[in-house]
Image: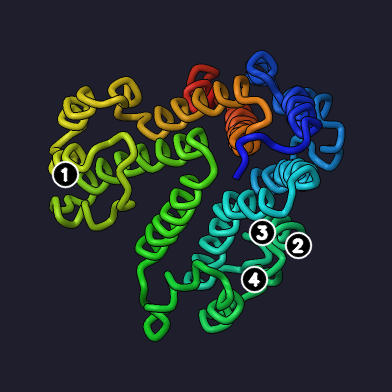
């Protein structure tokens, strides 16, 4: 597709939306609040539509309110995209649909009360992923399979259809992630090199973390590790991936990564996921600030808002439980 978006107004819209969200200084100001009441007041001063929240609002309810704002931003952006761009955008957003599906499947197989635990899914399925609207009310595996039967990711579940009640949750979730990244990486090749760079980098870093956890916590063999990985090598070569699949500890991993473009990503074994997210955040921000009229800018904007939501929740919950400010700081991406 053409590298330039047809409507320059979209770029102005995204810059305006970005300005309406919390910047680094405002996040630090939120973190400096000494009480939950003050933190909520500060948050509502930035987002007046969060009128329903107060210091008694639980984490899930706060997440739901923030996701409402997120979805509104997404719907605003889609108005500026043509049909082809919208199709690509929806493929990109399907990670949120898959996340809804993961949560419902986990809820069904563990016999939880979906209406209590999964209220946030209604935000997505009533406004964006309408083809699976109602999935939040599913209580049995067969009903679940029926409602997703027309979706592309159904193939992940179809091979387990006869034994769906006994399939390990972790196995399904890993396969869903692999399905998403294989699909979106294939699509990225037809969009532009910036988008391919974003998706390819995410895949490389996710594979590295999966390798580390599989070896450290589950003692997978090299072959078992390689079997769970997303079968794509972007800037992490196949040879390096094979070597990583037999590491014994974090230092082994660092030694191999020192020979790659990712040598400065993972700095602390205790914060390996945070290190990954911090690296990706800087990449999204750089592309968002420099790429004008490029569909990659849209994807970066969405990722930045997603990170902002996680930052807000981590700060509010840290203040709620009176964590040390430095401990909260370790959990946020800025």
Label 4 sits on a secondary structure element that is: helix
Distance of mark 2 from mark 3, alpha carbons? 9 Å
Label 2–label 1 contact, CB within 8 A: no
**Towards the viewer: 308 or 270:** 308
Residue at 63 percent of width and 38 percent of height: 295
Label 3 sits on a secondary structure element that is: helix
- Packing grade of label 1 (10 A; few <14, some 14-19, many >=20) is some
Query: For residue 23, what is the image quadrant?
Result: top right
Determine which residue is flagged by label 3: 121
Residue 208 in the image: state x and y as whole percent: 29, 39
**Towards the viewer: 34 or 19:** 19
Determine which residue is flagged by label 1: 242
- Up-down relation of residue 153 to residue 281 (above or below): below
Label 2–label 4 contact, CB within 8 A: no
Quadrant into which the N terminus falls: top right
Distance of mark 3 from mark 1, alpha carbons? 38 Å
Distance of mark 4 from mark 3, alpha carbons? 8 Å
- Packing grade of label 4 (10 A; few <14, some 14-19, many >=20) is many
């Amino acid at each position: 597709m053409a590298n330039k978006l047809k409507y320059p107004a979209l770029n102005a819209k995204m810059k305006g939306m970005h300005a309406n969200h919390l910047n680094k200084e405002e996040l630090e100001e939120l973190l400096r609040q000494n009480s939950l009441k003050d933190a909520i007041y500060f948050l509502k001063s930035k987002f007046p539509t969060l009128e329903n929240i107060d210091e008694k609002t639980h984490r899930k309810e706060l997440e739901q309110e923030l996701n409402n704002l997120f979805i509104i931003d997404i719907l605003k952006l889609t108005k500026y995209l043509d049909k082809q761009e919208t199709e690509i955008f929806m493929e990109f957003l399907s990670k949120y649909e898959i996340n809804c599906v993961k949560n419902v499947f986990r809820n069904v197989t563990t016999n939880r009360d979906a209406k209590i635990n999964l209220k946030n899914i209604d935000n997505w399925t009533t406004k964006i992923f309408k083809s699976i609207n109602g999935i939040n009310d599913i209580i049995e595996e067969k009903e679940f399979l029926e409602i997703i039967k027309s979706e592309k990711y159904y193939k992940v579940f179809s091979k387990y259809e006869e034994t769906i009640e006994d399939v390990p949750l972790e196995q399904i979730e890993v396969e869903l992630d692999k399905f998403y990244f294989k699909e979106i990486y294939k699509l990225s090749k037809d969009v532009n090199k910036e988008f391919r760079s974003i998706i390819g980098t995410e895949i490389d870093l996710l594979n590295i973390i999966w390798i580390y956890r599989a070896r450290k916590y589950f003692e997978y063999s090299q072959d078992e590790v390689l079997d769970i990985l997303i079968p794509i090598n972007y800037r992490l070569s196949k040879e390096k991936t094979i070597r990583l699949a037999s590491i014994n500890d974090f230092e082994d991993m660092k030694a191999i990564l020192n020979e790659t473009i990712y040598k400065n990503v993972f700095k602390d074994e205790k914060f390996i996921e945070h290190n990954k997210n911090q690296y990706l955040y800087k990449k999204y921000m750089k592309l968002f600030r420099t790429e004008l009229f490029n569909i990659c800018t849209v994807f970066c904007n969405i990722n930045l808002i997603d990170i902002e939501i996680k930052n807000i929740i981590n700060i509010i919950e840290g203040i709620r439980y009176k964590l040390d400010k430095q401990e909260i700081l370790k959990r946020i991406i800025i």
